[in-house]
Amino acid sequence: MRFEAEGRVPGATVDEVYPLLRDKLVDLVPFLDNVAAIQELERKPGAAGPHLLNRWRADPGQVPSLVRGFLKPEMLEWLDHADWNDAERHVDWRIESAVFAGLYTCRGRNRVVAAGGDVRIVIGGELIVDAGKIPGLPRLLAGKVVPTLEAYLVDRMKPNMASLGTGVARYRDRMGASR
């Protein structure tokens, strides 16, 4: 299932926002909705910009209370492989579950673009759930369950992705106030 989300950073420039996302993502955590932690595991040079591997952890407080007791902390984590393109001001990413290997494929591109006196962070991607990796799911139900599951997950992901712009704006406000 394809998706797109967009965040806005008012009164910012691409030259300000792009390096924040690339180099200060860990520092943005307190300003991001539904994110408990981001840990940079690897940073190495790439052809067009750095390659980063980050471990993200969702805020368990955002998980419905009925389900919280069944989730282990590592179930709320994912690995984010990011290849930055400094000339084009975008990042190609691929995320994978830290626990459920192969359950889904999720990849896309985030673009940082000028929009008048603001910056738009445009996040586009695709999520594909592998029905064969869902324990106990009968093959006959997969055709109905998987599209519903993908739609639900995308519906949950999009607002979080769109809030990236708000998080960057909050970070900028705080850093500007502390100068």
Image (cartoon, grey):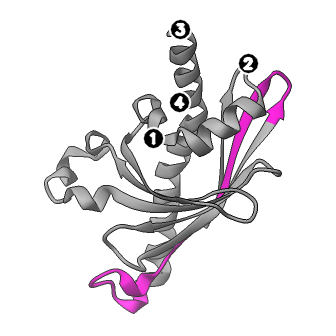
Q: Which mark is residue 13?
A: none
- Label 2 secondary element: loop
- The residue labelled by disc 4 is 167
- The residue labelled by disc 1 is 26
Alpha carbon separation for disc pair 4 and 1:
12 Å
Residue ID at (19%, 51%): 68
Q: Which residue in the rendered view is the most extreme toward the front?
A: 45
Front residue of 64/36: it is 36
Mark 3 or mark 2, which has the lower sequence index?
2
- The residue labelled by disc 3 is 177
Q: Are marks 4 and 3 in contact (CB under 8 Å)?
A: no
Residue ID at (19%, 59%): 72
Residue ID at (47%, 77%): 144
Alpha carbon separation for disc pair 1 and 3:
20 Å
In the rendered view, does 165 fall on the left or right side of 42?
right
Front residue of 144/3: it is 3
In the rendered view, does 164 fall on the left or right side of 17?
left
- The residue labelled by disc 2 is 11
x and y percentages locating residue 84 in the rendered image: 68, 56
| In this view, the mark in front (3 or 2) | 3
Mark 4 or mark 2, which has the lower sequence index?
2
Residue ID at (66%, 39%): 19
x and y percentages locating residue 111 in the rendered image: 73, 48
Question: Residue type at mark 2?
Answer: Gly
Q: Which quadrant of the rendered structure holds the C terminus?
A: top right
Please state the extent of the stretch shown in magenta in the rendering. Answer: 114-140
